[in-house]
Image (spheres, rainbow, N blue to C red):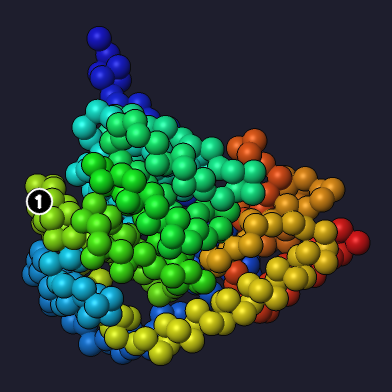
Amino acid sequence: MKWEEKVRQVEPYVPGEQPKLSDMIKLNTNESPYPPSPKVQEELALLEAADFRLYPDPQSTDLVAALAGRYHVGEEQVFVGVGSDDVISQVFLTFFSHGEPILFPQLTYSFYEVWADLYRISYVKVPLMEDRHIDPEDYCKPEEKGGIIFPNPNAPTGLLESIETVEQIVKANPDCVVVVDEAYIDFGGKSAIPLIEKYENLLIVQTFSKSRAMAGMRIGFAIGSKKLIDHLQAVKYSINSYTMSRAAIRLGVAAVRDDEYFRETISKIIATRERVKKELADLGFTFPDSQTNFILARHKNRSGKELYEVLRSQKIFVRRWDDPLIKDDLRITIGTDAQMDKMLDVLRMYIG
């Protein structure tokens, strides 16, 4: 037997293109168009290279304390990791590996399927309703489940589900862990974090990559009952105790403490998003009512591939998939007003 025959084969997650062009407009990976808080820059200037010879705090105590204070929970209810992808990966290992299939939406963050395949977890992809919302009844059926995970707002649709919908799903599934991935919650939604006081099987995951403009620093976190967090910590310490770097911990704390800047940049992104929605509609696009930092837009008589190539030829990068469900959609990250105006100008000239 060749050694290759023993290798675990999986279909990997494909991230957004990362072009290296000085004059490009990059609207394909949902990064913030604005820099992190000035307090992050100030803290960065205080870092000393000599400190990096030491291991980081395995408990990330300062960052956990800052997050606990920000979200009004106990420190024992907070778990941190190297981006929300790291956190969710450990969620799959900890809570979703006991035989019954887990449920997640058919059209959603494609990494869920990758993790399930990698960790050999069975799963069911639940179709969305015609309007692309989640139907909570699909998740409330009495059959055995290994767990449930869904983003709110969902990606790539950008649609937000109500707190009532989230609670309906959690309440109907006391025998499994329900994970709500709130990567985009700050752009128009209400977090389900308060529900963790009622449901010890609910875990909320968030990230610094979007609304806190720190995708390059890789900081994610989960908030849930002490029991859930204890189980996550046990798995983490079985794999790698030192996941968060010393720099990430310090800069993350600085970001959390600047709530004024956080709210200011989110407000700017939301204002730009709502303006661009109107202008895209005038150009013949339709889209779900996004409550995120992106818009999933489809033109009434132009293919997604055609428009993707037109924008790319002008060094404007958006995201597109060949998935039949969304092959004619473009996922457009909200950039600065100037960036969005340039994109709209290119579309106007082409569409006419």
Q: Is residue 282 above or below residue 327?
A: below
Residue 23 vs residue 143, the one in the foreground: 143
Where residue 343 sits, quadrant-wise, is: bottom right
> Would you name the residue on which mark 1 appears?
234
Q: Is residue 290 above or below residue 264?
A: above
Residue 76: x percent and y percent? 13, 67
Residue 254 vs residue 317, the one in the foreground: 254
Left or right, 231 with reference to 143: left
Q: Quadrant location of the N terminus?
A: top left
Q: Is residue 164 visible?
A: yes
Residue 191: x percent and y percent? 39, 68
Callout 1: few (<14), some (14-19), or many (20+) C-alpha neighbours within 10 Å?
Answer: few
The residue under the point 25% across, 57% down is 199
Where residue 117 sits, quadrant-wise, is: top left
Q: Quadrant location of the C terminus?
A: bottom right
Left or right, 73 with reference to 288: left
What is the number of callouts on the image?
1
Element type at marker 1? helix
Residue 316: x percent and y percent? 67, 62
Residue 179: x percent and y percent? 32, 52
Give the farthest residue toward the right: 352
Amino acid type, mark 1: Ala
Where residue 219 sits, quadrant-wise, is: bottom left
Give the farthest residue toward the top: 1
The residue under the point 55% across, 42% down is 128
Q: Is residue 44 visible?
A: no
The residue under the point 70% across, 71% down is 276
The residue under the point 17% across, 54% down is 228
Q: Is residue 220 above or below residue 71?
A: above
